[in-house]
Amino acid sequence: MKDTYILAIETSCDETSMAIIKNGNICVAGTVLSQMDTHAEFGGVIPEIASRMHTENITMVLEDTLNKAEMEMSDMDAIAVTFAPGLTGSLLVGLECAKVLSFVYNKPLITVNHIAGHIYACNLISELKFPLLALVVSGGHTEMIIMEADYKFKVIGATLDDALGETFDKVARVINLPYPGGPNVEKFAKEGKPAYNLPISMKNDLFNFSYSGLKSSIINLVNKEKAAGNEINPYDLAHSFQNVAIEQLTRKVENALKEYQLKNMIVAGGVSANNYLREEIKKVTDKYNVDLIIPPIEYCTDNAAMIGCAAFPLLKTSTFAALDANVSSIDRLF
Ligand code: KG4
Ligand code: ZN
C-alpha cells in the first residue's frame, strides 16, 4: 500500500505546532513553538496574546516542519487541524491556515478533536488495541473513556467539578510556584513528605472524580496556618496534594479495570507527563494484566503529531470537512 502523509496543525491553546505523520503512527517531523515564557509573566494564558502569537508564528512553523522533513506540500495526502476544544481565537488561526493550505494545494481537510488527539498520540508508541480504557487528564479534562473501536468513545466517568490539571495549576498558585503549575508541583513534591492530612474525595463513587473539595481544603489549610503565623512547607504540601490527587485516579482506574475486560489502558493529556502518576497507574495495570501505553512526555503535552495520528482513521474513512468548517466550543468528544 502507498504511504500516506498528513500535515497536522495544533493551535488550541498556547503552542503553535505542526507535524508530518506517516501512515498514522510515525512522526516524520514536528515543530512545537511554545508561548509559555510570554504567558508566564501573567501567571496564565492570555487568549488575545495567544492568538496574536499564533498568527505571527504559524508560517514559520510550517516552513520549519517541511524543511525538517525535506518534503513539500505536494507530498501531503491531507491537512488535519484541531477544531475543538480550546481557545476560540487560537483555534481559528490554525483552522484558517489549514483551510488555505487545503484550498491552495487541493488536499482534503480533516478536522480533529483535541482530546481524540491526546488519545491517538499513543499510536506513536504502540498500535491501540480495543477495547481499551483511556484516562484523559489535562488542564480542562478528567475523564475515563472506553473505546470499542476507532472513534467509538463511551465516557464512563468524569470530573464533577475541576479538572486534575487545573487543580495542579491552582495548588501551584496557592503555594506561590510559577506557571506552568503542574510540572513545578511535581518537582516540589519530589522533595517533600506526606506531612499534611488531606481528604480523598468521591470514595463511594465508581468512576467519577471531584477535585474542588481538595483544592478548597488546601486553600483553607494555607489560610489557617498563615493566620496562626505558621510557615507552610511547600515541598510537603505539594507532596501531600499529589499523593491524594493521584490516589483518587488510581482508585477509579482500578474500579474500571475490575468492571471491563480490556486489552489496553492508555493515559493521555498534559498531566500524564507526571512521573508519579505514571508509576502509580502502572502498578494498577500490572495487577490486572492490562498493557499500559503512555506517550513519552513530548507527546503528552499539546503537539500536532497527536492530531495527525487522530486524523488517520478519518482519512481512511474519507471523513473530510468542508471549507466552511468552523471551530467549536463544544467540549464533548463526539
Ligand atoms: O493537555 P495539556 O497540555 O493542555 C490542555 O489540553 O489542557 O495539559 C495542560 C495541563 C496543565 O494543567 C499542566 O499544569 C498539566 O497539564 N501538567 C502537569 C504536568 N505537566 C503538565 N500536571 C502535573 N504534573 C506534570 N508533570
Ligand atoms: Zn491538551
Image: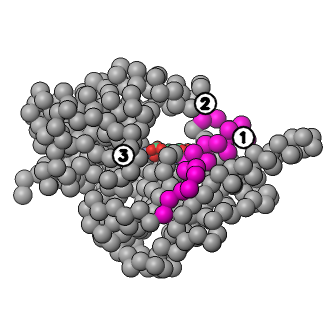
Neighbour class for label 2 at 10 Å: few (<14), some, many (≥20)? some
The residue singled out by tag 2 in the image is 43
- Residue 166's place in the image compared with 214, above or below, is above
Name which residue lies at 51% across and 27% down: 46
Residue reaching furthest right?
A: 228
Q: Alpha carbon of mark 1 to alpha carbon of mark 3: how far?
A: 29 Å
Using the rendered image of the protein, determine whether residue 234 is visible from the camera's viewpoint. Answer: no
Nearest the camera: 88 or 294? Answer: 88
Q: Is 175 inside the magenta-drawn segment?
A: yes
- In which quarter of the view is residue 80 placed? top left
Residue 126 left/right relative to 230: left
Neighbour class for label 3 at 10 Å: few (<14), some, many (≥20)? many
Name which residue lies at 20% across and 55% down: 313
Q: Whole-percent x and y of residue 45?
A: 52, 31
Respond yes or no on whether mark 3 lies under 8 Å from ligand 2: yes
Using the rendered image of the protein, determine whether residue 122 is visible from the camera's viewpoint. Answer: yes
Q: Label 2 is placed on what type of residue?
A: Gly
Tell me where the magenta segment starts and ends, as one range.
157-179
Q: Which structural element holds mark 1?
A: helix
Q: Mark on residue 114?
A: 3
Q: Whole-percent x and y of residue 157?
A: 48, 63
For marks 3 and 2, the one nearer the N-term is 2
Q: Mark on residue 174?
A: 1
Residue 293 left/right relative to 216: left
- Residue 34's place in the image compared with 296, above or below, is above
